[in-house]
């Protein structure tokens, strides 16, 4: 109200009935509601809830209006389109005539361009045909030359193989007589130099920088950087007993062929550093760390034994036990068979009784065979590392490729000849169509039109314009009515858009305000709770009593604890265990604390001391009088049936004594 008189505030006016209910109530929730109502926090809470509900209703209304706005916008666009079509109908008719003229000359241009394109492609095919004939002649000459070289190389290979077999026999003979042969130091050094030179050429199969890497390894070993000299690449340390099995063995070993072996991880770290100078990280040979021994593993009972086929281990000549043990560890070569024929490999491995201790098998083509799977190579595989003479293999591959290319070129030549004849026939037909089209275009439009569009796009545009003109002619109504409906739809849409925009801004602003108000509400509730608690403790201490108030805002409860005079320090009771007088006295302190934190121009108490003894009644009355003198800007009204003779004389105190009722009563009614 204007005078800030809150008649329904229980702290401003506590009548006899309300005082009685409050004194007899033992519910902590009722006390909390009393506190919330006295401090107006309850009213604030209800207001905020009402605002949230109103905001939700407003938001729902906005959503409904947005749907309505969509309909208005659709109507506006329809009216706008109809309005704009009024002025565009004549333009569409003129555009249709222009497009017909363009279409006529566009067809002339299309057929002319088509003829030029066919002529150009015809010349290109004739030129390409001549080039193919030249290539075929060159390939035939090259193929004849390579076949002669291949024949010569095959003869040389046979001679070298015979020399190799003879050399091996001589080597075996020399090995048996090794103890009786003495060679001079100079001869050995010369022989070593020759062997290193030939080995370098072979090592480049494993990488262009492989000879340089081995030279760096030898140098590092001589400098004492390795504990034991690394061995590798593995492919250079093995040889095939049967060269025809090169593809099978390479398919089995794969990346291991270029790998190196180290005795320990320290040597492996040094070797990694040397490799980084010659190979990128993504293409660096693998390093396998395994203990170097002088003996090959005992494979008794482990390896595969087949009466017809050999294992990978049996197909290889390996002098270094370290390499043998490494391949056994990494690839189990003692358990892998080499079976040249594909069909035979399937029958052996996938039959009812596969070989004992056999994990898999490889064919001469590099196919991989398991007991329940078969992996075929997608293309022809050539031996890269373990094959024979690389030059002979390369020449053989080139011959095969040239032969295939020759067949392809001959087939292309036949196709080109057929294409050229078909294009000549097509050219004659197109020239006739061009002449007919040009004659018709001159009839439609004698002046030649410069057209930048295609015939297809112009035809589509003509069809679209015809349909649109027909639709417009049938749908147009009164012009004034169309203009009036357009203006009305535009006004309604603009007005509704503005209203919704204002409502959205209002809701957004209200969201921010409510967040701020909620924070302030919680802060005020916390502040009022603390102040009420402190004032209550202070008033209880003035009476040399101990008391406390506990607020639980989550559960909305308020509990008052009091230690009456003469009890133990830790013997604190809540109000439910107090006598009527003690409860009235503590309630007065609670009301005084609420008075301290609330605003009102007057306070009124009715029979607040009805359950107090004389001592507590006098103390309570003195406290109330002292408070009224401190807050002389407010008016305090206390109604009591007890005597007021003990009150001091003061200009601030006015006592109104009422007449006794007609019934005989022992109490006197005083008003102060």
Image (cartoon, rainbow, N blue to C red):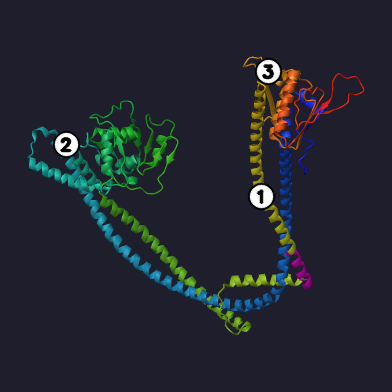
Query: Does the rendering let one see residue 240?
Result: no
Q: Which mark is residue 296?
A: none
Q: Which residue is mark 3?
A: 564
Q: Nearer the viewer, mark 3 or mark 2?
A: 3
Whichever of labels 3 and 2 marks the residue nearer the N terminus, that label is 2
| Helix, strand or loop at mark 2 | helix
Horizontal relation, residue 170 to residue 122: left or right: left
Q: Residue at x 67, y 27 (%)?
A: 536
Residue situated furthest bottom in the rendering: 446
Q: Nearer the viewer, residue 464 or 141?
A: 464
From the image, tell me which residue sits under label 2: 172
Task: Identify which residue is drawn at 56% across, 81% down.
Answer: 435
Query: Which x, y percent locates residue 2?
Result: 77, 44
In this view, the residue farthest toward the right is 662
Pointer 1 residue: 509
Q: Nearer the viewer, mark 1 or mark 2?
A: 1
The answer to whether residue 638 is seen in the rendering is yes
Magenta highlight: main SS: helix
Of 432 and 505, which appears nearest the observer?
505
Q: Quadrant of the rendered structure where residue 299 is?
A: top left
Whether tag 3 and tag 1 are in contact, CB under 8 A, the answer is no
The mark that comes first in sequence, 1 or 2, is: 2
Dot 3 or dot 1: first in sequence order is 1
Q: Is disc 1 placed on a helix, strand or loop? A: helix
* C-alpha gap between disc 3 and disc 1: 53 Å
Q: Nearer the viewer, mark 3 or mark 1?
A: 3
């Amino acid at each position: 109200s204007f005078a800030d008189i809150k008649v329904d505030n229980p702290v401003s006016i506590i009548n006899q009935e309300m005082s009685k209910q409050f004194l007899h109530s033992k519910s902590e929730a009722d006390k909390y509601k009393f506190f919330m109502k006295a401090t107006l926090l309850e009213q604030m809470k209800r207001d905020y809830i009402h605002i949230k509900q109103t905001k939700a209703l407003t938001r729902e209304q906005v959503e409904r209006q947005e749907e309505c706005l969509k309909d208005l916008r659709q109507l506006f666009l329809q009216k706008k389109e109809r309005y704009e079509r009024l002025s565009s109908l004549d333009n569409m008719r003129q555009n249709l005539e222009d497009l017909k003229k363009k279409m006529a000359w566009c067809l002339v241009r299309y057929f002319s361009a088509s003829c030029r394109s066919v002529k150009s492609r015809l010349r290109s095919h004739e030129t390409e045909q001549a080039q193919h004939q030249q290539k075929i002649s060159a390939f035939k000459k090259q193929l004849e030359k390579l076949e002669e070289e291949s024949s010569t190389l095959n003869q040389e290979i046979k001679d070298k193989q015979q020399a190799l077999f003879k050399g091996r026999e001589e080597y075996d003979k020399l090995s048996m007589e090794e103890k009786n042969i003495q060679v001079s130091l100079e001869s050995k050094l010369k022989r070593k130099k020759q062997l290193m030179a030939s080995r370098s050429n072979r090592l480049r199969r494993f990488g262009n920088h492989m000879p340089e890497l081995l030279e760096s390894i030898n140098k590092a070993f001589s400098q004492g950087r390795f504990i034991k000299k690394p061995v590798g690449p593995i492919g250079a340390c093995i040889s095939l007993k049967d060269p025809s099995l090169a593809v099978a063995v390479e398919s089995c070993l794969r990346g291991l062929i270029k790998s190196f072996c180290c005795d320990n991880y320290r040597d492996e770290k040094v070797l990694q550093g040397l490799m980084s100078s010659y190979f990128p990280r993504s293409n660096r040979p693998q390093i396998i760390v395994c203990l170097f021994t002088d003996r090959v593993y005992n494979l008794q009972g482990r390896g595969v034994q087949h009466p017809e086929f050999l294992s990978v281990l049996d197909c290889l000549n390996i002098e270094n036990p370290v390499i043998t043990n490494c391949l056994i560890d990494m690839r189990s070569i003692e358990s892998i068979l080499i079976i040249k024929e594909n069909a035979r490999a399937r029958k052996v491995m996938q039959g009812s009784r596969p070989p004992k201790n056999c994990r898999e098998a490889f064919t001469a083509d590099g196919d991989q065979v398991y007991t329940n799977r078969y992996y075929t190579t997608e293309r022809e595989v050539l031996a890269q590392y373990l094959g024979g003479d690389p030059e002979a293999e390369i020449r053989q591959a080139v011959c095969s490729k040239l032969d295939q290319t020759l067949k392809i070129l001959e087939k292309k030549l036949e196709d080109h000849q057929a294409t050229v004849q078909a294009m000549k026939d097509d050219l004659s037909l197109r020239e006739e169509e061009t002449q007919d089209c040009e004659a018709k275009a001159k009839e439609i439009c004698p002046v030649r039109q410069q057209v930048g569009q295609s015939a297809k796009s112009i035809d589509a545009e003509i069809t679209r314009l015809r349909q649109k003109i027909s639709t417009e002619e049938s749908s147009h109504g009164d012009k004034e009515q169309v203009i009036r409906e357009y203006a009305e739809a535009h006004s309604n849409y603009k007005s509704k858009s503005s209203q919704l925009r204002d409502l959205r801004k209002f809701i957004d602003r209200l969201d921010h305000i409510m967040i701020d108000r909620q924070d302030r509400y919680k802060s005020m509730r916390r502040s009022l709770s603390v102040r009420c608690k402190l004032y209550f403790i202070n008033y209880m201490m003035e009476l040399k009593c101990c008391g406390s108030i506990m607020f639980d805002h989550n559960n909305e409860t308020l509990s008052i604890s009091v230690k009456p005079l003469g009890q133990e320090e830790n013997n604190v009771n809540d109000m439910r265990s107090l006598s009527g007088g003690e409860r009235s006295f503590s309630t007065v302190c609670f009301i005084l604390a609420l008075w301290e934190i609330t605003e009102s121009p007057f306070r009124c108490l009715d029979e607040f001391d009805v359950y107090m003894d004389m001592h507590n009644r006098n103390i309570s009355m003195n406290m109330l009088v002292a408070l009224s003198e401190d807050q002389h800007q407010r008016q305090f009204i206390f109604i009591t049936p007890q005597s007021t003779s003990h009150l001091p004389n003061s200009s601030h105190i006015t006592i109104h004594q009422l007449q006794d009722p007609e019934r005989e009563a022992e109490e006197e009614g005083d008003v102060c």
